[in-house]
Image (cartoon, grey):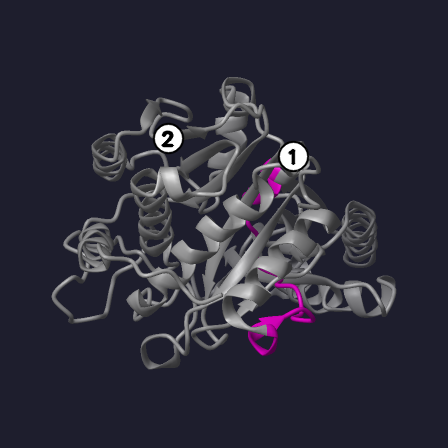
Amino acid sequence: MVPLKIPFLADLAAIRRDLHAHPELAFKEQRTADLVARELSSYGLQVDRGLAGTGVVATLRKGDSARAIGLRADMDALPLDEKNDFPHRSTTDGLMHACGHDGHTAILLGAARYMAEQRDALDIDGTVYFIFQPAEESEGGAAVMIADGLFDAFPMDAVFGLHNWPGIPVGEMAVMPGAVMAGTCAFEIDVHGQGCHAAMPHQGVDTLVVTSQLVLALQTVVARNVHPCESAVVSVTQIHAGEAWNIIPDDAVLRGTIRSFNVDTQALVERAVERLCNGIASAFGARISVRFDHRYPPTVNSVAESETCRRVARELLGADKLRVDELPSMGAEDFAYMLLEKPGCYVWLGNGPGSGGCTLHNPHYDFNDEILPLGISYWVKLAESVLATGSEDLGHS
């Protein structure tokens, strides 16, 4: 199998660059959603809007089978100033597509157009739902779409996701069963000491000394509490305290993130953080409180659907281009919510080294249009593999 010939590739690249030039934040993707819906309608597909506000779902049916799958792309951008100078750079200060969601949207639009135009030639007996999701970046748009009735209005047996991945060469994919992205939890720690003049520290409880001890102690949570064969990250990312150079402040606030691949490890880490807070507070005569804000759960691929995706990727790209032992990422992904509801698989499509070798969420990042036909071919061949005429076993077709 070789990648499909995409006769409208230039049109698709133009759409991708238009999206890049007009980024929109979570739940504000109105222009993007309008463009997506307009394109899908022009392909002759049924288009539904309104889930999670700006979500768009298109439907393609062929044959009599009740089987159905969902293919998902995310649409939102990041609050980041772009530092590229190419013609399609962001036209909105402080916003840019630094994670390639413009490319994901273009790939899924291309797959929808190809399948609509080649409907009669497709080996499909069932339904494909093209899911364009808002608010992946930290706002949980997938969970909102589900709460708004995504899987009730569009019943499907499995759901699949794709993300461009810098560092993996163009023409390669990574497909792994099990945990592929971490769950994420934000924490906030309030430290209350006793403020005093900086020249007379014996008259107070030095909040900043307590805070410094806590930051260092938190580095032992994973190293000395989590099983060496498990994975977790605890990172302090903010410290806020004090306003004057000669005053030891009353209060300080620490914020950061916890990443792990299973809920038991997450709970263990939280208990260890609480224990350290209590112990350090007691040792220094301070008061410390901690709050946890659970964000995205781990993204966990189901085994059968992962094997189907591996087979499609192997046939499409060649066995030597399929990465099956890539380490999971400590990044988080709200496609996890969809995988809590339905079996499915989330894969990484090589984007090459990126602009100047930069990674995701970098102000110089840009999606590589060279991989558009690979992503489209993967979606089309996956739909044909799972919904093949005469196939009865979804996930083992």
Q: Is residue 227 above or below residue 170?
A: above
Q: Which mark is residue 58?
A: 2
Location of residue 209 by image quarter: bottom right
Label 2 SS: strand
Q: Which residue is denoted by mark 1 in the rendering?
A: 342
Q: Residues within 10 Å of mark 2 (few under 14, many from 20)?
A: many
Question: Residue 30, how many percent across, how many down?
Answer: 25, 33
The Cα–Cα distance between marks 2 and 1, rounded to whole angstroms, is 19 Å
- Magenta residue span: 319-338
Among all residues in the image, which is located at the extreme bottom?
356
Q: Residue at x 46, y 77 (%)?
A: 169
Residue 392 highlighted magenta (yes or no) = no
Quarter of the figure that contains the C terminus? top right
Residue type at mark 1?
Lys
Q: Position of residue 325 (x, y in %)?
A: 69, 71
Q: Residues within 10 Å of mark 1 (few under 14, many from 20)?
A: some
> Residue furthest toward the left?
87
The secondary element bearing badge 1 is classed as loop
Q: Nearer the viewer, residue 237 or 280?
A: 237
Total numbered circles: 2
Q: Is residue 367 left or right of residue 158?
A: left
Residue 66: x %, y % from top left: 58, 23
